[in-house]
Image (tube, helix red, strand yellow):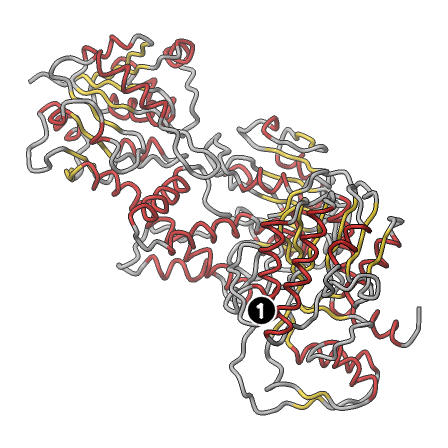
């Protein structure tokens, strides 16, 4: 057979990255979105998504890619992915109305032998209920990681495919698309694949929760979690890529969604899932780590400080602020002036009565009493202790993610606070 | 867990403190008066909540725009009789509020409502009292939540200390008094247990803030820094300036600790600062000695 043509319906983060990754394998790709202006911007090379390597890849394989706002153009495709991001509310609940409408619009446009594959995050049971021929209907687990989406989309570890009948071979067109990525393919029933996606995220959160819990203990008993984590990664039962870096709670929306889904399903089906509730609680506690530290270490010495906040995105290399610890902290610092800088996110995202937008990290630090590095953007690593000492009034650096050199800061007279290690107190506090 | 009706502090038309002659109620009444708030203090001699006509009598003293602070309790409730009497007092208040609704109600509960294993305690911790006293507060909380016709805030203080505390329970009050008299302090075991000790004025200041913001919800009253009973004893001795023996005894019970995560308070009242234990004990000692 000739090389299949692949369609992607929904050109949000997931759809766009996935479409470009398939094009990079030499396949023809049609990207569809009902938003004409969005399609025009993408076609002109202005991608609405920040992902390292995405612009370059889209440019290099532009000849393989076409974009359209006409759903009928998907009729030429052998396989169409439903690939729109699924928004969540503050409780991690998915709003499935958007993809349901999208599927409703796409199905009539498909060719008679075309395959339909749901790539979005959906709860178990969603795919089987779709009004489409089960022999041509699939669900595929996506493992998009904000900030590393391209790398993971181009070189996936494996494909997890939900099918009506896992014993039947995949259709040739679908097998050809997945085969282009040269990785294991794991067919299973729809519900298993949908739950597998959630299981992956639960395992990640479990590791994170362990890291958070023991990092907190490390801070209190004089241990350093960053000395411990490498030892764990060398343990084959834990693994070199395990999520052992402590953080400020789960953010971004996707992990929260999966935890909420498990809790909801467990309650409805009578399963014991208190450990999942404990993960949610742990995340909530971790989110306020910096706030508690400020009240413990800064405010007792200086009732009227100015804070500089570096980073608004929920993590580096993304523009997303969904459940961002930085924005959560800012909401609780309304009584004090703040100076803010993020390389990508506009200060317009900040709701604060006394916020100053700074043009750079060092300018954000100018005149402040305490520097709070809330997102580990790589560019913050270039801040030198000497420069910080020359522009800051105070001598407190709160660096949860260890962006800066603790010893150098301490030598420059700073008190330094990071996740997983006891405080390093400098010669001069504030 | 606690939200404000107004972020800008406003003065209540009038605060009514029920249980104004007690240790906690007295401190709250004094604090509100210091804040220039009109206060009606109601003591048992004014309205005995165990009397049959108490609800009607209390309702006659209330106004629609009042903020009521309900402190009154037979405490600690150690037996079934005390438990039932406390519930009757709660019932009378609810009946009074049905006759004369008020704008705001603040209930002074206790951290005894939480399970012993809840550690660190937050406002979300499991409420599973292990004592009659804790059950009493948990039941009164439930009664007020279900039936009181008012915007309700529940404050749950940890262990309180202060000059006027009539109880001489194991902890800062007893240790300070013993040290002042030069008498030895006897610890359970080696006094390893850690608890969060709160200076009485801090409860009063928080009540004032809750009234000013018309806050609703639940808030623990704890400093977030627990200290062992031995540390408290050593501090009390040091502040007394006397040579006082601190005696350990063979341990009879397993060591338990209680810590609080006070993030909710930091968020609700970011400018509020708890009195550090040392400072609170110093002030208590000065007040006891009549030194301003």
x and y, in percent, of residue A370 in the image: 68, 46
Q: Is residue A413 visible?
A: no
Examine the image and state in which quarter residue B8 appears: top right
Decide which of A410, A227 is in the foreground and name it. A227
x and y, in percent, of residue B94 in the image: 67, 53
The residue at the point 27 percent across, 13 percent down is A63
Q: Residue under circle 1? A: B258
As drawn, A406 above or below B239? above
Decide which of B145, A140 is in the foreground and name it. B145
Relative placement, left or right, of B60 versus A424 is right
The residue at the point 66 percent across, 48 percent down is B152
**SS type, badge 1:** loop
As drawn, A181 above or below A3? below
Relative placement, left or right, of A289 versus A55 is right
* Circle 1 chain: B
The residue at the point 17 percent across, 30 percent down is A178
As drawn, A150 above or below B149? above
Relative placement, left or right, of A246 versus B15 is left
Please tell me how crowded label 1 is: few (under 14), some (14-19), or many (20+) other residues with Cα within 10 Å: some
Relative placement, left or right, of A317 versus A308 is left
Decide which of B154, A335 is in the foreground and name it. B154
x and y, in percent, of residue B253 in the image: 53, 84
As drawn, B196 above or below A357? below
Examine the image and state in which quarter residue B233 appears: bottom right
x and y, in percent, of residue A341 in the image: 61, 33
Examine the image and state in which quarter residue A167 appears: top left
């Amino acid at each position: 057979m000739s090389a299949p043509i692949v369609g992607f319906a929904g050109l949000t983060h997931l759809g766009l990255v996935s479409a470009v990754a398939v094009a990079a394998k030499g396949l023809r790709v049609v990207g569809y979105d009902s938003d004409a202006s969005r399609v025009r911007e993408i076609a002109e090379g202005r991608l609405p998504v920040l992902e390292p390597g995405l612009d370059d890849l889209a440019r290099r394989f532009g000849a393989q890619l076409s974009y359209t706002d006409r759903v009928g153009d998907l009729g030429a495709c052998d396989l169409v992915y439903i690939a729109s991001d699924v928004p969540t509310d503050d409780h991690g609940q998915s709003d499935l109305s958007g993809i349901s409408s999208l599927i409703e619009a796409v199905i009539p446009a498909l060719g008679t032998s075309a395959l339909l594959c749901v790539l979005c995050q959906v709860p178990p049971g969603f795919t089987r209920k779709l009004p489409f021929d089960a022999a041509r209907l699939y669900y595929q687990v996506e493992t998009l990681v904000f900030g590393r989406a391209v790398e993971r989309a181009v070189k996936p570890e494996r494909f997890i495919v939900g099918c009506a009948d896992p014993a039947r071979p995949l259709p040739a067109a679908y097998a050809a698309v997945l085969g282009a990525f040269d990785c294991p393919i794991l067919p299973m029933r729809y519900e298993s694949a949908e739950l597998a996606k959630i299981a992956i995220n639960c395992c990640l959160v479990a590791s994170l929760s362990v890291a958070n819990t023991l990092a907190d203990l490390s801070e209190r008993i004089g241990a350093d979690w960053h000395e411990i984590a490498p030892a764990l990664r060398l343990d084959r039962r834990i693994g070199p890529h395990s999520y052992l870096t402590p953080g400020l709670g789960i953010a971004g929306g996707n992990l929260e969604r999966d935890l909420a889904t498990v809790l909801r399903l467990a309650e409805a089906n009578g399963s014991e899932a208190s450990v999942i509730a404990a993960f949610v609680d742990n995340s909530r506690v971790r989110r306020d780590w910096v706030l508690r530290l400020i009240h413990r270490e800064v405010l007792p010495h200086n009732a009227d400080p100015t804070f500089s906040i570096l980073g608004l995105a929920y993590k580096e290399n993304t523009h997303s602020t969904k459940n961002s610890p930085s924005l959560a902290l800012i909401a609780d610092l309304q009584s004090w002036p703040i100076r803010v800088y993020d390389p990508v996110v506009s200060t317009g995202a900040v709701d604060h009565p006394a916020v100053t937008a700074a043009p750079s990290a060092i300018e954000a630090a100018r005149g402040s009493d305490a520097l709070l590095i809330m997102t580990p953007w790589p560019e913050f690593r270039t801040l030198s202790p000497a420069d910080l000492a020359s522009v800051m009034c105070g001598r407190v650096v709160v660096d949860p993610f260890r962006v800066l050199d603790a010893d150098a800061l301490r030598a420059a007279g700073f008190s330094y606070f990071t996740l997983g290690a006891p405080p390093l107190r400098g010669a001069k506090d504030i | 867990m606690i939200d404000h009706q107004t972020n800008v502090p406003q003065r209540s038309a009038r605060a009514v403190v029920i249980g104004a002659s007690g240790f906690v109620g007295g401190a709250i009444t004094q604090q509100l008066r210091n804040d220039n708030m009109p206060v009606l203090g109601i003591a048992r001699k004014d309205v005995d909540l165990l009397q049959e006509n108490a609800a009607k009598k209390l309702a006659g003293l209330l106004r629609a725009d009042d903020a009521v602070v309900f402190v009154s309790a037979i405490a600690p409730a150690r037996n079934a009789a005390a438990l039932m009497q406390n519930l009757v007092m709660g019932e009378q208040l609810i009946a009074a509020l049905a006759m004369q609704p008020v704008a705001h109600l603040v209930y002074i509960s206790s951290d005894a409502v939480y399970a012993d294993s809840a550690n660190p305690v937050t406002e979300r911790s499991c409420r599973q009292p292990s004592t009659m006293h804790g059950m009493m507060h948990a039941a009164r909380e439930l009664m007020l939540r279900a039936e009181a016709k008012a915007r309700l805030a529940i404050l749950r203080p940890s262990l309180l200390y202060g000059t006027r505390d009539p109880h001489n329970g194991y902890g800062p009050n007893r240790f300070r008094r013993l040290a002042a008299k030069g008498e030895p302090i006897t610890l359970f075991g080696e006094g390893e247990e850690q608890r969060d000790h709160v200076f009485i004025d801090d409860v009063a200041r928080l009540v004032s803030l809750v009234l000013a913001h018309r806050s609703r919800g639940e808030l623990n009253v704890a400093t977030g820094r627990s200290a062992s009973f031995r540390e408290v004893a050593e501090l009390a001795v040091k502040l007394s300036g006397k040579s006082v023996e601190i005696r350990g005894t063979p341990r009879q019970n397993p060591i338990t600790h209680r810590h609080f995560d006070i993030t909710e308070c930091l968020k609700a009242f970011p400018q509020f600062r708890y009195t550090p234990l040392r400072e609170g004990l110093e002030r208590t000692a000065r007040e006891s000695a009549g030194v301003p």
